[in-house]
Image (cartoon, rainbow, N blue to C red):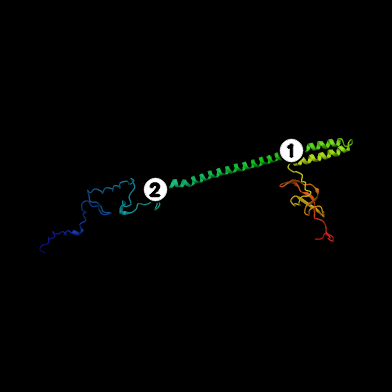
């Protein structure tokens, strides 16, 4: 046909669609044998800051990830940053440090508690010794106050056969001396005859109809009392007056 190049005799016309010669600078397809005399493609340079010997995710042939255990690559757990991974050893040591501080605090408190218990025990023993000392001193003081009374009783007994009247006077004097001793010890003798009856001070053992005494007063003291207020040694044993009896009154209320 006119206008078309005629094929050479005995040959096949070239097909432009089947031309496999790659353009200049293009990489040959995967698995294709490079033409004779062509230089192999240079290895891609790692990006700035990348560790040498570590392949990037997109640098592997075909865009595949390098297999696990590839030399020169450090595996990390998903979602864990490099900073968190670097801080893990310090975070693991923190609980042990807190536990050591708590153990030291507990040991300090236990030592203080033991010292306080020892101090309280020493105080209890010291106070017990002090109370025993004070009791002994008070007993000795009371006994010393009564020694002159015993001395006067001994003198009265020596003159009992010679002068009986002098013995009676001596006993009266010794009685007064003993009353003075009790008064100095804080237990004065109470003279309650004729006083108004007071249940806190008196112990009534009976009543008597006495026209000369005011009703409700102490008609007679059977046993005197010593001391007053909080320092009462014993109450007085008394008989209480009720007033004169009326004619025909049998005493039954």
The answer to which of marks 2 and 1 sits earlier in the sequence is 2
Q: Which residue is mark 2?
A: 83
Quadrant occupied by the N terminus: bottom left
**Quadrant assignment, res 2:** bottom left
Q: Residue at x 79, y 36 (%)?
A: 148
**Extreme-left residue of the structure:** 2
Q: Residue at x 81, y 39 (%)?
A: 174
Q: Residue at x 42, y 47 (%)?
A: 87
Q: Is 8 or 109 nearer to us in this picture? A: 109
**Quadrant assignment, res 4:** bottom left
User: On screen, 56 above or below 148?
Assistant: below
- How crowded is the residue under tag 1: few (<14 C-alpha within 10 Å), some, or many (20+)? few
Q: Nearer the viewer, mark 2 or mark 1?
A: 1
Helix, strand or loop under label 2:
helix
Q: Which residue is mark 1?
A: 141
Q: Residue at x 41, y 48 (%)?
A: 85
Q: Is 210 or 104 nearer to us in this picture? A: 210
In the image, is 133 to the left or to the right of 207?
A: left
Instruction: Please state the horizontal and vertical placement of residue 202, each as a whole percent of the image.
Output: 76, 50
Helix, strand or loop under label 1:
helix
How far apart are the alpha carbons under marks 2 and 1? 86 Å
Instruction: Please state the horizontal and vertical placement of residue 22, each as a whole percent of the image.
Output: 22, 54
**Extreme-right residue of the structure:** 161
- How crowded is the residue under tag 2: few (<14 C-alpha within 10 Å), some, or many (20+)? few
- CB of mark 2 within 8 Å of CB of mark 1? no
Quadrant occupied by the C terminus: bottom right
Instruction: Please state the horizontal and vertical placement of residue 139, each as a whole percent of the image.
Output: 74, 39
Q: How many marks?
A: 2
């Amino acid at each position: 046909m006119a206008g078309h190049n005629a094929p050479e005799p005995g040959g096949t016309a070239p097909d432009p669609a089947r031309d496999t010669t790659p353009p200049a600078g293009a990489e040959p397809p995967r698995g294709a044998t490079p033409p004779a005399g062509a230089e192999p493609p240079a290895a891609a340079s790692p990006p700035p800051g990348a560790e040498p010997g570590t392949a990037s995710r997109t640098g592997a042939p075909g865009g595949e990830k390098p297999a696990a255990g590839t030399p020169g690559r450090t595996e990390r757990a998903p979602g864990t940053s490099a900073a968190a991974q670097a801080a893990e050893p310090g975070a693991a040591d923190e609980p042990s440090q807190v536990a050591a501080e708590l153990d030291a605090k507990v040991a300090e408190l236990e030592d203080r508690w033991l010292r306080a218990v020892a101090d309280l025990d020493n105080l209890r023993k010291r106070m017990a010794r002090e109370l025993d000392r004070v009791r002994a001193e008070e007993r000795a003081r009371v006994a010393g106050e009564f020694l002159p009374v015993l001395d006067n009783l001994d003198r009265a007994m020596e003159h009992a056969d010679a002068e009986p009247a002098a013995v009676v006077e001596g006993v009266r004097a010794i009685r007064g001396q003993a009353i003075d001793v009790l008064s100095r010890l804080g237990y004065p003798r109470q003279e309650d005859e004729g006083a108004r009856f007071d249940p806190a001070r008196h112990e009534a053992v009976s009543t008597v109809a006495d026209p000369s005494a005011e009703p409700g007063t102490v008609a007679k003291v059977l046993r005197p009392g010593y001391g007053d207020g909080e320092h009462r040694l014993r109450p007085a044993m008394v008989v209480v007056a009720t007033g004169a009896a009326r004619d025909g009154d049998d005493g039954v209320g």
